[in-house]
Amino acid sequence: MTQTIAPRVRTLVLLLLAACGLLLTTAGPASAHAALTGSDPQQGVVVDKAPDQVSLTFSEKVALSNDSLRVLDPKGKAVQQGKPFEVGGTTYGVKLHSGLPDGTYTVTYQVVSADSHPVAGAYTFSVGAPSTTSVSVSGETAGGGVVGWLYGFGRYMSYAGFIVLVGGAAFVLGCWQRGAGVKPMQRLVVGGWLTLTSATLLLLLLRGSYTGSGKVGDVFDLDLLGNVLQTKAGAALVSRLLLLAAAALFISVLFGAYDKREDEEKRDLTFGLAIGGTVVAAGLAASWAMAEHASVGLQAGIAMPVDVVHLLAVATWLGGLTALLVALYRSDAPIESAAVRRFSQVAFGSVAALVATGVYQSWRQLGSWSAFTGTRYGQLLLVKIGLVALLVGIAFISRRWTAQLADTVVRQNKRAPQKERVAASASGSGKSKGGGSKRAAQLARQQAAMDTARQKRTRDADPNRFGLRRSVLAEAGVAVVLLAVTTVLTQTEPGRTEQDAKAAKAASSSSSSSSASAGSGAVTLDMSFDTGGTDGKGVVTVDFDPARVGGNEMHVYVQRSNGRAFDIPEVKVALTLEAKKIGPLAITPDRIATGHWSASNVQIPMAGDWKVAVTVRTSDIDQTTVSKNAQIG
């Protein structure tokens, strides 16, 4: 039986690592937690005179660097001067050189949101008249590439290390104090500390490149590292390292002096370790809360302590579950059913705290029921809720096995004194023979080893313990996938922010369209499409300016249903004046930026009710054509 245990554990680890890797690699770049809600000049407009500055408005405060805002002329030359500055509130600007010639200008931005995540994007506007541009902004993403993947992996490992460290230590101190002398348990907790420490150092090195250039070569740039140390995220990581030094002292006492104390002496030390360990664990949890979602937005003063409690509940539950798994599979010392029952009670309290804090966090981050299905954050949250429910269901099965395990342990404990008396008798008889004492001691050791092996075989053959092992193994598998989903969730824009930014952007676009229509007769057409393939749903918007006979500027924007721009292989437009049997006039716009295509000097020969048909191709075989009529001229 014992020979099959290690392969099972290895198989579980490989399976769970593969599942986590899949989740992390499909997560892509970190989603923007601060969204661009407005700009001056606005996206796609044509202004008569070159502005003195360009300003951008975000949904929340952002951090700027010297290259956060750039404005490029049609040839790709930077035309901004000086450093970006805060205009007021959540609006930021950069000055432009005077006397800029006519043409299409590209504005690029890369900032860091208040909850520590990088945000990047680009848009265009024109001075005098639109022109072709050599600027390509296809690479304007934040948190992507190799550095982005490594940063995501580091985040996952830091969460995993925290859970194993805190949960494992809590399991030993609160549920199974004999575990302090068990080598596999010691290796587990120390491994959690090493994992969290290594991951924190990795995140600290990657942070500058992750929020900046995204280049691997910048990881060891000391100037970038110095800048990171001055940010909120950098301070949180340094604080975590200092707390880990205190955690190392806690571990040395727990597995050193504590294990050697007698039961009466352990009581006072247990209280001290519990207080000190709770303080260190809460501090470690606060290093996440002070720099991420909880630190910004609605009710931040309440959200941060709630987030700390949430993280501690997760660590106590899932980390304790990991420790129980190690005790059942890797420890030679049998774990008492009383210890399993105590953990069951602790886990129940942790789940209750998890549910209470999770409900508050969900309300704070989503804000509406529609955000559950209408935003990526809400969809991931539904997956997380389902995994938690599954985990609780498996835990209920484990509680049943725990109850049945009690009788077996009692019987084993009754047999133990008899074996001790036999060993003592053999030792005593050996001593009476003088010269045979060494032989007797050797026989006693052999007998003890045989008894231990026999006891282990009996323990492993117990169907109740075997059932508990299987249920705990299943719990651990679900728990690691749950951790991976949670890691991706922390990198995803909250649903409330996404919906607010979308509403603000829509209001800004509506205002811009109304103003343009009143002043120049510009026409904006929004058309939903569905090609039937993967990522085949979205909205295509066509702008004609000035929407009159003769030359016109045409812009085409493709967005997902949640308002985010995305690229597709091909967009084509055809104009038909059916009343005069003119057309279709085919137009193939040029790609300008992510989800943005443009065509200049589009000739409309006659005024009338023109049919605007847009062909959208989302893959080699998936495409559709949608159309709307517009009065032009």
Image (cartoon, rainbow, N blue to C red):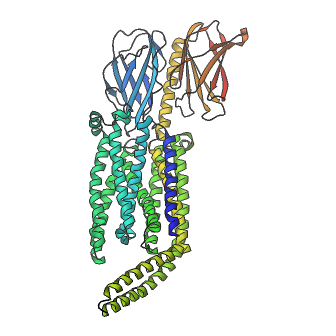
Q: Reply above or below: 437 against 268.
A: below
**Residue 62 seen anywhere in this rendered image of the structure:** no
The correct choice, above or below, for 340 with respect to 364 in the image is below
Q: Quadrant of residue 338?
A: bottom left
Q: Is residue 519 left or right of residue 280?
A: right
Q: Residue at x 34, y 84 (%)?
A: 441
Give the total number of marks visible in the rendering.
Answer: 0
Residue with the most extreme front position = 435
Placement of 71 over or under 216, stated as above or below:
above
Residue found at the very far bottom of the displayed protein: 432
Report the side of 17 relative to 605 (left or right).
left
- In the picture, measured across the screen, residue 633 lies left or right of residue 264, that is right
Along the viewing direction, whichever of 597 and 114 lies nearer the viewer: 597
Q: Position of residue 9 (x, y in %)?
A: 49, 60
* Rendered location of residue 240, percent (x, y): 31, 49
User: Quick one: 352 or 222, which is closer to the camera?
Assistant: 222
| Front residue (pair 142, 45) | 142
Residue 301, image x and y in percent?
35, 47
Which quarter of the rendering shows the C terminus?
Answer: top right
The image quadrant of residue 437 is bottom left
Picture layout, residue 481 above or below residue 278 = above
Residue in the image at 35% along x and 92% along y: 429
Is residue 6 visible in the rendered image? The answer is: yes
Name the spot of residue 34 as percent of width and height, x first: 42, 35
